C-alpha cells in the first residue's frame, strides 16, 4: 500500500521536466533521485544525499544492470575498432559505388528497413541501425536526431509487434500467472490491436518516404541543411566524438567487410545466446547476458579479422578497445543515474500510485483507452516497459473480466502504453541507447521525438476508445 501519496510522482516528474527545460540531464536525474530519497528519508536532506550515493552504488548489485552498462561501454570499443579499420568508410564507399543510396529518402528508408528486419532485441537493433546508417546520414546531411528517432521508433514497437523474443516471453508469463487459459493466443490476437506500435512504425515510414518534419525535428533538419551542423551548438552526445570521427588507417584498403562481419556476428549471435541462456528456449533467455556476450564475440571477431589482415597489432587492438570503452563514460553515468531513479521510483511506489489514482476513472467502454493512458503515464514516469507490464497486466485482466471487455484489446492497451514509455521516456534505456547509437544529444533526441510519439499516442487513444465501444 502506497502511504507516500502524490509525492511518489514528484522525483520522476521533476527529473523529466528539468532535463527537458535545462538540457542538463545528469544534474536533473541526480536531483530526481535525491528528491526521492529525501521523501524516503522522511524529509531529511542529508540522509537523502547519503542514500542517493548508496543507491548509485547499488545499481551494480543487479547483474542485469551491470551487464547492460558493460555492453554499452564495449559498444564504444566496437565502434572504435570498425572506424579505425576503415570498415565504416569502406561500407559507405561500397554503397556509393553501387549507387544504392542515391538520396536522403533512400538513407531514411534503409534505416527504417533495418529496424523492421532485426526484431530479436531492442538494443542490438538500435545499435546496428546506428552503426550502419550514421555515416550515410552524415554524408546525406540528415540530422543525428532523425537517425535516433528512426532507430528508437523501430525498436520497442517492432519487438512488441514481432514478439519472438524476451518481450513476448515476459508477457506470456504474466498472462499465465493471472490465470489466462491461452496466453499465447491472447498475445497473438493483441498484436493487430497494438495501435500505438503500428501507428509509430507507419509514421516513420511516411516520414522516410516524404521527408515530413514538424516541431523540433524540423528545426534540426533545417540546421543541418542550412548550416551543415549534424548536432546543435552546445550539444553533448553520450559518445565521445573522437571515437565517431576517428580517422581510418590510410596505408590499407578500406573494406566494408571490416564493419559488416563484426556487426553481422553480433546480430546473429544474439538469438544463439538467447537460446543458450534459455536452456533451449529462446523466449526464456537472458537479454542482458545475450547482448553482452554478443558484443564481446563481435569485438573478438574484429580483432582476429584485423590481425589476419595485419591491419593492427595486438597492442593497437587493445588500445582501441580501451579508448572506445572510455569514450562511453558519459553514457555509463547516464545509465547508472537512470537505473537508480527507476529503483527509487519502485521503492516510492510511483507506478502503483498512478494506477490507483486513475482506477476510479475507468468505465466499461473506456477501459481500453484509459488502460492505455495509465500504462503510458506509468511507463513514461518510470522508464520501463517490463515494469509497466508487470504492474498493469494484473490490474487489466480483472478489469476486462469485470466489464466483459475483449481481453486481447485490453492486453494490447497495456502493451501499447508500455511501449510508449520505453520508446520515448528520457530515462528509458532504449531511448538512451538510441541517443548513443546516433551520437546525438540525449535531450535533443527526446525533444525531437516526443511530438511524433504524442501524435501516435493520441491516435492510438482514439482507436482504443473506438475499439472499446465496438468490440
Image (spheres, rainbow, N blue to C red):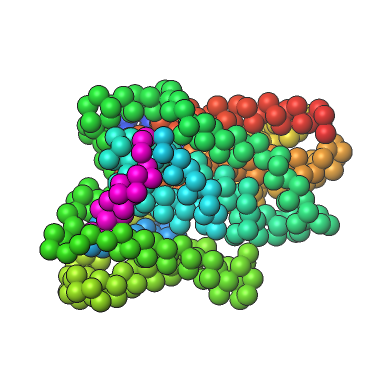
Residue occupying the point 23% across, 31% down: 228
Kindly tell me whether residue 357 is visible in this rendering: no
Residue farthest toward the front in the current orientation of the protein: 98
Residue farthest toward the left in the current orientation of the protein: 251
Location of residue 249 by image quarter: bottom left
Magenta stretch: residue 83 in it?
no
Residue occupying the point 31% across, 69% down: 302
Magenta stretch: residue 102 in it?
yes
Tell me the chief SS of the magenta region. helix
Left or right? Give the position of 63 relative to 27. Answer: right
Residue occupying the point 47% across, 53% down: 125
Kindly tell me whether residue 166 is visible in this rendering: yes
| Residue 178, placed above or below residue 382 | below
**Residue 95 in picture, x, y percent from top left:** 34, 49
Magenta residues span 86-104
Residue occupying the point 33% across, 73% down: 300
Q: Quadrant of the C terminus?
A: top right
Left or right? Give the position of 11 relative to 247. Answer: right
Front-most of residues 308 and 167:
308
Q: How many marks?
A: 0
**Residue 126 in picture, x, y percent from top left:** 44, 50
**Residue 343 in picture, x, y percent from top left:** 49, 52
Front-most of residues 37 and 288:
288
| Residue 239, placed above or below residue 69 | above
Location of residue 84 by image quarter: bottom left
Amino acid at each position: 500500500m502506497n502511504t507516500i501519496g502524490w509525492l511518489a510522482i514528484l522525483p520522476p516528474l521533476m527529473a523529466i521536466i528539468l532535463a527537458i527545460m535545462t538540457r542538463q540531464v545528469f544534474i536533473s536525474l541526480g536531483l530526481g533521485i535525491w528528491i526521492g530519497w529525501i521523501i524516503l528519508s522522511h524529509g531529511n536532506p542529508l540522509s537523502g544525499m547519503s542514500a542517493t550515493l548508496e543507491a548509485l552504488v547499488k545499481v551494480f548489485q543487479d547483474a542485469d544492470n551491470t551487464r547492460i552498462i558493460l555492453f554499452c561501454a564495449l559498444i564504444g570499443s566496437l565502434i572504435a575498432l570498425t572506424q579505425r579499420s576503415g570498415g565504416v568508410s569502406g561500407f559507405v564507399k561500397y554503397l556509393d559505388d553501387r549507387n544504392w543510396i542515391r538520396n536522403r529518402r533512400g538513407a531514411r528508408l534503409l534505416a527504417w528497413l533495418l529496424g523492421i528486419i532485426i526484431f530479436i532485441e531492442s538494443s542490438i537493433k538500435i545499435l546496428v541501425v546506428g552503426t550502419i546508417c550514421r555515416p550515410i546520414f552524415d554524408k546525406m546531411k540528415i540530422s543525428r536526431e532523425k537517425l535516433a528517432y528512426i532507430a528508437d521508433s523501430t525498436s520497442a514497437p517492432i519487438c512488441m509487434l514481432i514478439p519472438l523474443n524476451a518481450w513476448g516471453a515476459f508477457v506470456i508469463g504474466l498472462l499465465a500467472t493471472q490465470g489466462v487459459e491461452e496466453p499465447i493466443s491472447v498475445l497473438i490476437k493483441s498484436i493487430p490491436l497494438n495501435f500505438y506500435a503500428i501507428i509509430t512504425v507507419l509514421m516513420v515510414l511516411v516520414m522516410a518516404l516524404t521527408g515530413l518534419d514538424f516541431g523540433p525535428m524540423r528545426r534540426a533538419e533545417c540546421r543541418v541543411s542550412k548550416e551543415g551542423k549534424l548536432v546543435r551548438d552546445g550539444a553533448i552526445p553520450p559518445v565521445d566524438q573522437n571515437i565517431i570521427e576517428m580517422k581510418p588507417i590510410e596505408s590499407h584498403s578500406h573494406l566494408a567487410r571490416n564493419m559488416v562481419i563484426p556487426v553481422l556476428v553480433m546480430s546473429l549471435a544474439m538469438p544463439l545466446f538467447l537460446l543458450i541462456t534459455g536452456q533451449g528456449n529462446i523466449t526464456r533467455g537472458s537479454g542482458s547476458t545475450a547482448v553482452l556476450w554478443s558484443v564481446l564475440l563481435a569485438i573478438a571477431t574484429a580483432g582476429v579479422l584485423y590481425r589476419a589482415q595485419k591491419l593492427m597489432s595486438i597492442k593497437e587492438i587493445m588500445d582501441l578497445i580501451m579508448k572506445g570503452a572510455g569514450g562511453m563514460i558519459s553514457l555509463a553515468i547516464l545509465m547508472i543515474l537512470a537505473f537508480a531513479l527507476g529503483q527509487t521510483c519502485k521503492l516510492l511506489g510511483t507506478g502503483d500510485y498512478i494506477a490507483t489514482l486513475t482506477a476510479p476513472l475507468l468505465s466499461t467502454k473506456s477501459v481500453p483507452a484509459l488502460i492505455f493512458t495509465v500504462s503510458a503515464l506509468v511507463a513514461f514516469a518510470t522508464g520501463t516497459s517490463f515494469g509497466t507490464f508487470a504492474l498493469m497486466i494484473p490490474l487489466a485482466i480483472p478489469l476486462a473480466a469485470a466489464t466483459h471487455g475483449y481481453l486481447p484489446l485490453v492486453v494490447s492497451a497495456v502493451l501499447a502504453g508500455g511501449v510508449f514509455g520505453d520508446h520515448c521516456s528520457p530515462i528509458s534505456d532504449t531511448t538512451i541507447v538510441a541517443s548513443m547509437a546516433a551520437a546525438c544529444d540525449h535531450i535533443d533526441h527526446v525533444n525531437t521525438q516526443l511530438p511524433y510519439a504524442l501524435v501516435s499516442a493520441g491516435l492510438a487513444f482514439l482507436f482504443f476508445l473506438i475499439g472499446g465501444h465496438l468490440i
